[in-house]
Image (spheres, helix red, strand yellow):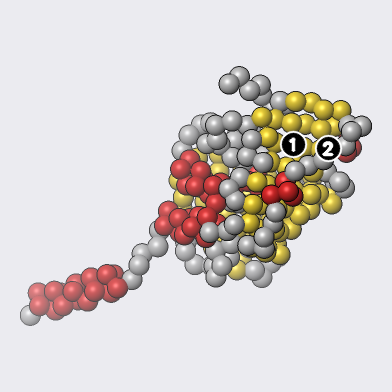
């Protein structure tokens, strides 16, 4: 009799498990990546915090690679990436920094919050839930509910050794990204007022550089190809 009861219980448990989809962290970030891959473009307010430094402005993205940040703090600072060339205008130094980018396979900063960026994150980082798949507060002072994923790098070449994604449960939009660099510095990206598929023209990612600024080419590394 006991064996029959045990078999019935086991059968019921199996039926329940088969009826439910067990959502793993890897599956969850795959869903988020799928959402972002469906965006033709998006625009959002962005805040970037590193130590005591805080920058803010508007970020624009057009698939697959175009990215632009127009900063209000520092005023008039601009970062533009068109898939091949990264351009930064630093008005405080009257300087324009450019970098040829070839190949791909690595992406950093706000560019991680794009369809291609998330594909690379899934490839180069292992995902796990911070505490579980249930929503939790964004932080101690906020009532916003998010699901938090921890991404741990698989390879030593990545600039961030760990990334925490805070994701809005209903929309699967990234609300916050917190990356810890290999040197132990915490960099936080906050996204708000996100508008998607609004028809951002490619012309927005063409930057007219001030003629009086000093230009420094390939400021990160030399393109040897």
What residue is shown at x 92% (from left), y 32% (from top)? 212
Image quarter for residue 206?
A: top right
Quarter of image, res 97: top right
The residue carrying pointer 2 sits among few (fewer than 14), some (14 to 19) or many (20 or more) residues within 10 Å by Cα, namely some
Residue 53 % position (x, y): 79, 45
Name which residue lies at 9% across and 74% down.
Answer: 3
Residue 54 placement, left or right of 195: right
Question: Observer-nearest residue: 187 or 217?
Answer: 217
Residue 136 visible in image: no
Q: In this view, does 95 lie above or below 44?
A: above
**Of labels 2 and 1, the one closer to you:** 2
Q: Is mark 1 on a helix, strand or loop?
A: strand
* Label 1 crowd (10 A; few <14 / some 14-19 / many >=20): many
Rendering coords of residue 157 (x, y %)? 53, 31
**Closer to the camera in the image, 9 or 99:** 99
* Disc 2 element: loop
Name the residue tied to disc 2.
209
Residue at image x 67%, y 63%? 198
- Residue 87 numbered mark, or none: 1
Side (left or right) of 104 relative to 110: left
Residue 212 left/right relative to 137 = right
Most foreground residue, 79 or 156: 79
Q: Looking at the figure, which quarter contains the N terminus?
A: bottom left
Q: In this view, does 204 lie above or below 18?
A: above
Asked if disc 2 and disc 1 are in contact, CB closer than 8 Å, the reply is yes
Label located before the other in sequence (2 or 1):
1
């Amino acid at each position: 009799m006991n064996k029959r009861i045990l078999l019935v219980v086991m059968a019921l448990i199996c039926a329940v498990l088969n009826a439910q989809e067990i959502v793993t962290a890897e599956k969850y970030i795959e869903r988020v990546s799928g959402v972002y891959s469906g965006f033709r473009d998006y625009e959002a307010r962005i805040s970037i915090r590193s130590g005591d430094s805080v920058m803010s402005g508007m970020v624009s993205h057009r698939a697959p690679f175009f990215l632009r940040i127009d900063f209000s703090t520092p005023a008039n600072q601009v970062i533009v990436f068109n898939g091949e060339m990264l351009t930064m205008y630093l008005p405080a130094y009257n300087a324009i920094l450019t970098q040829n980018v070839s190949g791909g396979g690595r992406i950093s900063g706000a560019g991680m919050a794009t369809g291609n960026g998330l594909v690379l994150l899934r490839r180069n980082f292992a995902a796990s839930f911070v505490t579980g798949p249930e929503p939790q507060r964004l932080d101690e002072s906020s009532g916003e509910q998010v699901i938090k994923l921890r991404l741990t790098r698989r390879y030593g070449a990545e600039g961030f050794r760990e990334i925490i994604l805070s994701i809005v449960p209903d929309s699967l939009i990234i609300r916050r990204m917190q990356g810890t660099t290999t040197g132990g510095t915490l960099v936080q990206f906050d996204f708000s007022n996100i508008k998607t598929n609004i028809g951002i023209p490619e012309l927005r990612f063409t930057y007219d550089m001030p003629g009086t600024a000093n230009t420094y080419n390939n400021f990160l590394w030399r393109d040897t190809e």
